[in-house]
Image: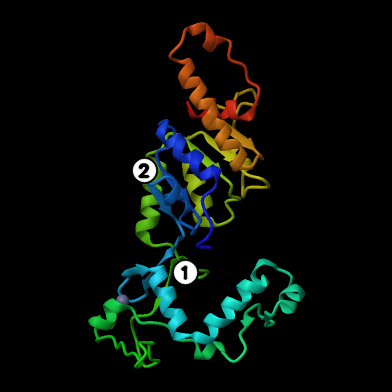
Amino acid sequence: MSMANPNSGHYALRDLGKLGMVKNVITQNVDSFHPRAHPEIPTLELHGYLRSAVCITCRNEHPRDVFQTELARLNPAWKEFLKEAISSGALETEDPDEKRTRGIKMNADGDVEVPGAPYTTFRYPACPTCLARPPPLADGTKGVVEVDRDGALEPTSTAGILKPAVVLFGDSISAEVKHAADEAIDSAGRLLVLGTSLATYSAWRLAKRAKDRGMPIAVINMGGVRGEEAFFTDLDPKQAGGRGVRTEISTESLLPALVHEMRKSEARSHQDAPHVASFERTNPAEVFRDFLS
Ligand SMILES: [Zn+2]
């Protein structure tokens, strides 16, 4: 994951931001590609981010790479296993048989079996903040944070557990993030839904909120979108895209084309009026141009 990079869609959003067309981004992705590609546009990461580990007691965040280095140091058998799995290509296939021939055995529950290293012996570092100063717990008592001589958290500890700073299944989104997402929607004039089926309630709810506020919505997604009929049924079938757009094109091809169109029309606006009048609709990016202008 640390070797992956943002794609042309992420950079096209950056360019739309420069053109004044995109003011806020809300993402469900945890890969940090949006903040990396367009640091100038505020990005709200609805489900958190993998770049940090967060302490479940004090909520302080720590850089993920430091956490990862510590995990490797405390679990040498796992480190070796991962190294071998990467070099054999076992992580690049989803096929269980193929994985097995490349050295990875999956348990019935889908977990990877690491020879000589059961999950129960996996060790992890303590939150440095809680270790330095054990925090008070919800019941008023002082938390216990104990580590062995290698620095691995002891099972006697009652605080200081680190986890990736993402919303995992069963977790809920924090009240602050929910509120910030509502604010981003309420301050917008239009909503562009890009490359998501809105399957999670936390994301669908925001599109619904925009619709309830009478906002035009454009949905670009390959495949179905949760409750999408509700976003478009009330629109006049003759509307040309200014009130809503729905299309199945990849964002990676559509967004750069849209940037191209916006730049062309910006250049055209500095010329004489007849050029504007002779503008012809030939591709979907032009429909979006109308949606955004
Ligand atoms: Zn802590």
Which disc, if any, is residue 171?
1
Mark 1 Cβ inside 8 Å of ligand 1: no
Determine whether 221 is above or below 51 in the image: above
Cα gap from disc 1 to disc 2, whole angstroms? 29 Å
| Helix, strand or loop status at disc 2 | loop
Q: Say whether residue 116 is left or right of residue 95.
A: left
- In the image, what residue type sits under mark 1? Asp
**Which residue extends farthest right?**
97
Please report the residue visible at 39 percent of the width from the left and 62 percent of the height from the top: 174
Q: Can residue 288 be seen from the camera position used here?
A: yes
Residue furthest front in the image: 87
Amino acid at dot 2: Glu
Residue on which the image places disc 2? 40
101 in relation to 206, above or below = below
User: What residue appears at the point 36 percent right and 53 percent down from the top-left corner?
Assistant: 179
Number of labels in the image equals: 2
What residue lies at 58% left-to-right and 40% top-to-bottom? 219
At which x and y percent is residue 180?
A: 36, 51
